[in-house]
Amino acid sequence: MSSSLEPYTHLTILQFATASGAALSFLAAFWLQFQISGRRRAALQNSPVKSTVPISPNWAVGNGVFLTTLLLISRMVDARRITLPLSNYFDAFLLLGLVLSLLWAYLRWTRHLWALATFLLPMIFALMVLGIVLGLSGVRHFGAHNPWVAAHIASVLLGTASFAAGCVGGITYLLADRRLKKRGQAGWDLFALPSLASIEKFTRHAIVLGFALLTLAAITGIFRAVRDPQLMGQHWYFSPKVLLTAVVWLVYGSLLNMRFVPILRGARCAWLSIIGFALLMTVFVLML
Amino acid sequence: MENIIPSETSVLMVGLNHRTAPVRLREALAFSDQAAEEALAAFKQRFPASEVVIISTCNRVELYAAPHGSPPPTADELVEFLADNRGVGSAETAGSIYRMQQQAVVEHLFNVVSSLDSLVLGETQILSQVKQAYQRAAAVQAVGPVFHALFQRSFAAAKDVHEQTGLGDGHVSIASVAVDLLRGVFDRFDDKTVLLVGAGKMAALMLQHLMAVHPGRTIVTNRTAEKSAEMAGRYRLESADFSRLSELLTTADIVLASTGSPEPLITAETLKPLMKARQYRPLVIVDIAVPRDVDSHVARLGNVYLYNIDDLERVAQNNRGQRGAKVDLSRDIIQRHIADCMHYLAARNTGPVVKALYHQCREISDQELDALLAANPEFSESQKQAVRKMAHRIVGKILHVPVTELTTQTAHHRRIRLAGAIQELFHLLPPESDDSVPEKPPEDESGG
């Protein structure tokens, strides 16, 4: 590796600290949102309000986005060129955080689905933490100058963002379902949740998009493995990463065919969208 | 010496509401829109200088008046006017009518408009009803400066209460709670099918609320075919034979059960196989029958949401409780607005005195300045300006403390006594050009 790329492959403590700060900002935004709901509930129950909310959750998210952007710019400065941050997991997961922040803003302001926006925040936090852990284990270069690799990484990244949104949709669906099943008992109105139908629609759209991107990622990945046998060895198709990805692909594929497999409707679909995402995350962890 | 202190801004109210009068009496005294307009005209004819607003809803009839002129109308005359106008004997209304004056009227109106005095706490209909009453009176020039200020401030208070406390959030009637639950499951209804199992009075009542969401298709079925046919005819619904219940359950998205059957008509065992035929589409069942038409085990099936009358009542009760919890917060908000309104009404009394006092002191200071400047022609323009400014500052500083003392008095009798003393001590006369009443004392020019 040439010495000019040296700073790019090594992350400084400041960069790790900034990434952690950004991730914590998203978690703080989630916590603040809950505090606000808690305060509302305390006010409703006429009990004294215990905590105060120092800043708006929107500002916390803004802070996270600012730090992440700053960090990506500093990484480009390290690389001494303007590039999409797709050449390693650390950068890619930061970008994932930014993409999901955009979705958060969309849900928060453009649609009346803000409960989904709230549950997206811990997801952004978790993904950024995963990116930091992958970064700590060493920055792996993908060689993203190769267009096949760049297409593979980009589709993996955006596919992951879609499935993450689908998983958040699944979690929100289960919460809404549980609340409707509880029939007016405690915890009835902490959050104004969207209707089951709108959550299901959101989840389905996220999964359709994610599935298309995952398929693209699989095709480009297979193409790469076939063309460059040294990359993953001769029996690349037996590697846990590939097998698990195939399982993930099948899980989401079955979800897409809900019309033909109606038993997967409702809560089952929600569970599968969560399980599918958990498996996808396992694929990432396997690469540590 | 001419008295320049206006008599205290007086407001009176007489009326009755759902707590003090039976519906029969409220009906007898209620005004239609036209009757209210005629009554306002009649009132203006009898008391031309007074302001008046008549509020008439199904739960209350109230007459608000700001009496001016000589002699101003009394509360008894207002009651008499109300009874005569509606053709009801005073003896009949005697025990039900309440009379209020001054701050009590302001407090009552603010509570009424914010719906704290309503039968259903937090309802917003009363706000638009009072707005209408106020606009109706304003249209016939029955509203003057006092009522413009009073009513507009009451609307602002109601807006603050609803915005800051969410007093009207969450439905409190069983039928609207059921509709809320449906909205929790579905996002549109134009492609949904409602199935009414039972065609009794309760079903008809719930149906009227359900129609608000405009379902695509509504089918009614009943064990007695004639009853379902009759209901279908009355509400333009589809009628179906009761023997087809299983098939109907396959098509329906929303089921409203209200039969008098002693045994459950829908059980988990009968519904479970149907769910597959339904392709596991969500099904909401609202069971308002007692004894229940739907076995409670049905609720355990996936994608089935079952609510019985107790569940709906619990949600409604919960919402009512939450509204109750918001009352204290609402009262705090209203209190701030009442204080502001009372301050305005008080300022109407002291305004002319304050204005005359400033006018007189400035006149003396200007006369002295003119004499001084005429005797000293050697003063430059900047020196003249400086001397003028100083004189005005001295007037402002001397008057600041007594004027503040006067205008911040909350006790009416003390405020009038102080105003009288100031008028007497300074020999105040009304300023020549004065025909407006300032709401606040003039600013202290010293800035201190």
Image: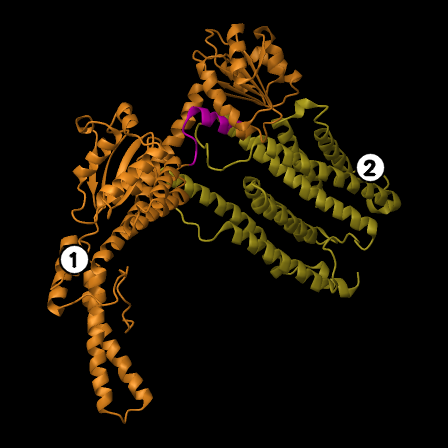
Chain colours: A yellow, B orange
Circle 2 sits on which residue? A237
For the point 21% across and 32% down, the residue is: B97
Which quadrant, please, contains the N terminus of chain B?
bottom left
Residue B289 place in picture, x, y as percent: 45, 14
Which subunit holds the residue at mark 1?
A: B
Residue B155 place in picture, x, y as percent: 36, 45
Say if mark 2 contacts mark 1, CB within 8 Å: no
Of the pair B208 and B401, the residue shown nearer to us: B208
Q: What's the residue type where badge 1 is placed?
A: Arg
**Local crowd size for mark 1, using a 10 Å CA cut-off: few (<14), some (14–19), many (≥20):** many
The image quarter containing residue B76 is: top left
Relative horizontal placement of residue B216, taking residue B12 as reference (left or right): right
For the point 13% across and 54% down, the residue is: B413
Of the pair B263 and B396, the residue shown nearer to us: B396
Seen as rendered, the residue at the extreme bottom is: B378
Circle 1 sits on which residue? B415
Residue B176 within the segment the image draws in magenta:
yes
Q: Nearer the viewer, mark 2 or mark 1?
A: 1
Residue B205 place in picture, x, y as percent: 45, 19
Does label 1 lie on the same chain as label 2?
A: no
Any part of residue A48 in sight: no
Residue A85 place in picture, x, y as percent: 72, 55
Which quadrant, please, contains the C terminus of chain B?
bottom left
Q: How many marks?
A: 2
Which subunit holds the residue at mark 2?
A: A
Relative horizontal placement of residue B219, taking residue B372 as reference (left or right): right
Seen as rendered, the residue at the extreme right is: A227
For the point 40% across and 31% down, the residue is: B319
The image quarter containing residue B277 is: top right
Give the residues drawn in magenta, as a range: B169-182
Up the image or down, B116 lies above or below B410; here it is: above
For the point 21% across and 51% down, the residue is: B9
